Each structure stands twice: as structure tokens, then as C-alpha cells.
Image: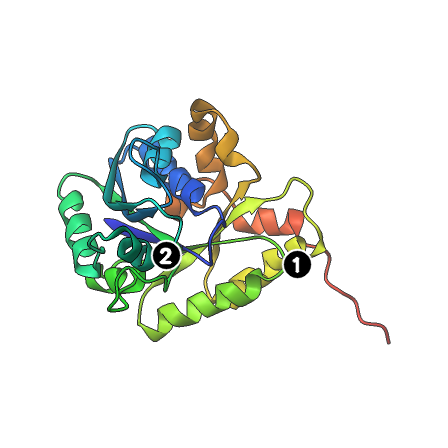
Amino acid sequence: MPVLVITGTGTEVGKTVATAAVAAAAVAAGRSVAVLKPAQTGVGPGERGDADEVARLAGAVTARELARYPEPLAPATAALRAGRAPVRPHEVAEAAAKLTTEHDLVLVEGAGGLLVRFDADGGTLADAAKLLGAPVLVVATAGLGTLNTTELTARELRSRELDLLGVVIGSWPTEPDLACRCNVTDLPEAAGAPLLGALPEAAGALSPATFRSMAPEWLTPCLNGTWNAEEFTAREAPAPFARGA
């Protein structure tokens, strides 16, 4: 798996921190890692973007952006309003492929959800994943509403014949409510793919050293971690509902 595409079920789902965790776990396993952010929006010159944040948390990774637009909008809209060239899927695929020549693992982090448009022609992260032949990791929220957005994302991936590697919960609450706890069981069913990790709430606020040391504990072995989905589900999911006679 030289390239892994990471998308979210929407904005503010913990995608960048999850990308950093995947990167940190891979580095801890002795792999060389690059993170590619095709289109960074909402960040000005000299400010830290998502790829930079991944590098801050994960450590020894190569951080790359293809384009940066100042307004916090979908990339296609942000590029148009800035009067700048958009990023196109083939450019993303070419940049990721080039990074694979010098790195064991390249993480391509999207903007928002899977179908957020890069350009006026409707190019998306899904198109870039198709060109790369790369699996996709979906980062989802824990609470109410996540089943719908996760299943929609999974269905779109399958309609495009893309490989859904699994789902990571971007932020697991310190005190999960009933919806969160039920979703531990329901998310894999909605996605039709395994749960591959859960990051603790506010993981991104940890010191980089602590983040790096703990990241493998939040991810399954297929993501270079030690997290056990069955143990997590047994601990966090509510007991099965018993129907009355």
C-alpha cells in the first residue's frame, strides 16, 4: 500500500489529526512517510496548513501542498474567487506517484468530503484515488448523524469501484453518549468495512512527543498500530437490547 487516500464524511471530523496518527504510527514502524494536501483552503501565506500540522504532530514526514487558497471554501470555489488555477485530479495523482519513489507511504489528505470539487469540471478526490488505484480510509464522527454520511461515502466509493480500507473515528468523546456507543457497532455495518481505529477527543492538543508515542494505540495493525476493534467494541458499545415478551 504505497499510497493511502484519506477522506472525511464532511468537514471538522478530525481528518487531519487522523492523518497525523496514521503518519506517526507508520514512522514508528520504521516507514518513510509523505503527506500530500492537494488543495489547502482557508490559510494565508506563512500560516500552517494541514500538511504542516501533520508534520508537527507526526514528526519526520515530508509535507507537500499543491495549491493554497485564502478563503475557507471548497477548493474549486476558493480557486475561482482567488483568481488562481485549480488543482486537477491528474496533478494529484502525478504528485503522489512522484512521492512514492522516495517514500514507503504517501498519505493524500482531501478537503472536506469525498466529492468536494477541486475544479470547475467536477474533479474530486475520488477521481484522484481512481487514477492512483489507491485504497481510501474514511474518517467519521462518533455521534448522531454519522451513520448516514458514512454509508453515503461508502456507497459512492463502491459505485466508483474504489477500495474502502475502513473507517476511523476522528474523535472519541471522553464521555460518549448512547448514540456514540451504539455507533461503535453500527458504523462498520453502515460502511460495509471494518472499524480501524478511534482517536481520543482532543488528541491534536497533545504535545507532539505524546502524540507520537500514543498514535499506534489508536489504530489497528493494518495501519501500523496495536488498537483492537473487538476489545474497543466490547468496552464501549452498550449491551444488546433485549426485547420484551
Nearest to the observer: residue 230 or residue 112:
112
Give the residue displayed 36% in from the left and 29% down from the top.
Answer: 56
Residue 74 circle label: 2
Callout 2, which amino acid? Ala
Instruction: Give the side of residue 208 with respect to residue 89, left or right.
Output: right
Residue 138 circle label: none
Residue 182 on image: x %, y %: 66, 58
Q: Decide: few, some or many residues near mark 1? Use Cα within 10 Å; few <14, some 14-19, many ≥20.
A: many
Give the residue displayed 36% in from the left and 36% down from the top.
Answer: 54
- Which badge, 1 or 2, comes first in the chain's sequence? 2
Residue 185 on image: x %, y %: 60, 59
Q: Is 107 drawn above or below residue 138 in the view shown?
A: above
Q: In which quarter of the image is residue 124?
A: bottom left
Q: Is mark 2 on a helix, strand or loop?
A: loop
Instruction: Give the side of residue 165 with respect to residue 196, left or right.
Output: left
The C terminus: image quadrant: bottom right
Q: Is 116 drawn above or below residue 220 in the view shown?
A: below
Residue 156 on image: x %, y %: 39, 71
Q: Is 111 drawn above or below residue 103 in the view shown?
A: below
Q: In which quarter of the image is residue 90?
A: bottom left
Report the residue marked by disc 1.
182
Residue 92 on image: x %, y %: 21, 54
Nearest to the observer: residue 106 or residue 63:
63
| Residue 187 in sight here | yes
What residue occupies the far right of the structure in this picture? 245
